[in-house]
């Protein structure tokens, strides 16, 4: 099963900039533990850290392509910022939740099954 793992943290980018070397080393170790646990159960299909929200653009709903407004910034106005994601393949959602618990404790982690649809 393919699973999207989204990582969000309040004031993510400011907190990372303010983090000392020990904190950063622990976070990197947590990511490495997650990666190893996923690979033991399946595969990491992709994953990336995201740039700060200031450069984001959101395409809003509209009647057609030409009428859809584009706004500066992320989809939601919130202190929580999406900092990155993984696309993993594991046996089931329980396995995905198990490995997601290894991610840095500062993050709220959303684990969501990917729908395999052919378009």
Image: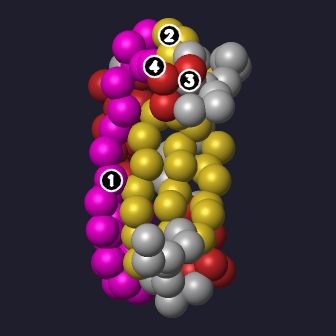
The residue stretch that appears in magenta? 32-59
Q: How is the image coloured?
A: secondary structure
Q: Residues within 10 Å of mark 2 (few under 14, many from 20)?
A: few
Query: Which of the two discs, 2 and 4, labels the residue nearer the N terminus?
Result: 4
Residue denoted by label 1: 47
Judged by depth in the image, the label closer to the viewer, 1 or 4, is 4
Query: Which of the two discs, 1 and 3, labels the residue nearer the N terminus?
Result: 1
Magenta-drawn stretch contains 10: no
Instruction: Please provide percent x and percent y for residue 96.
Output: 55, 73
41 in relation to 62, above or below:
below
Q: Quadrant of residue 60?
A: top right
Residue denoted by label 2: 72
Residue denoted by label 4: 57
In the orientation shown, which residue stands out farthest toward the bottom? 91
Please tell me the numbered disc located at residue 68: 3
Do the residues under discs 2 and 4 have CB atoms within 8 angstroms?
yes
* Local secondary structure at mark 4: strand
Give the spatial CA distance, label 2 vs label 4: 5 Å
Magenta-drawn stretch contains 40: yes
Judged by depth in the image, the label closer to the viewer, 2 or 1, is 2
Res. 74 visible in picture: no
Give the spatial CA distance, label 2 vs label 3: 13 Å
């Amino acid at each position: 099963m393919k699973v999207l793992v989204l990582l969000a943290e309040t004031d993510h980018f400011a907190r990372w900039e303010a983090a000392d070397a020990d904190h950063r080393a622990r976070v990197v170790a947590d990511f490495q533990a997650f990666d190893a646990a996923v690979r033991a159960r399946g595969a990491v299909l992709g994953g990336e850290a995201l740039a700060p929200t200031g450069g984001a653009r959101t395409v809003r709903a509209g009647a057609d392509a030409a009428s859809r407004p584009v706004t500066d910034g992320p989809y939601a106005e919130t202190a929580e910022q999406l900092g990155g994601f993984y696309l993993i393949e594991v046996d089931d959602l329980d396995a995905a939740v198990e490995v997601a618990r290894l991610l840095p404790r500062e993050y709220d982690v959303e684990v969501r099954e990917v729908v395999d649809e052919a378009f």
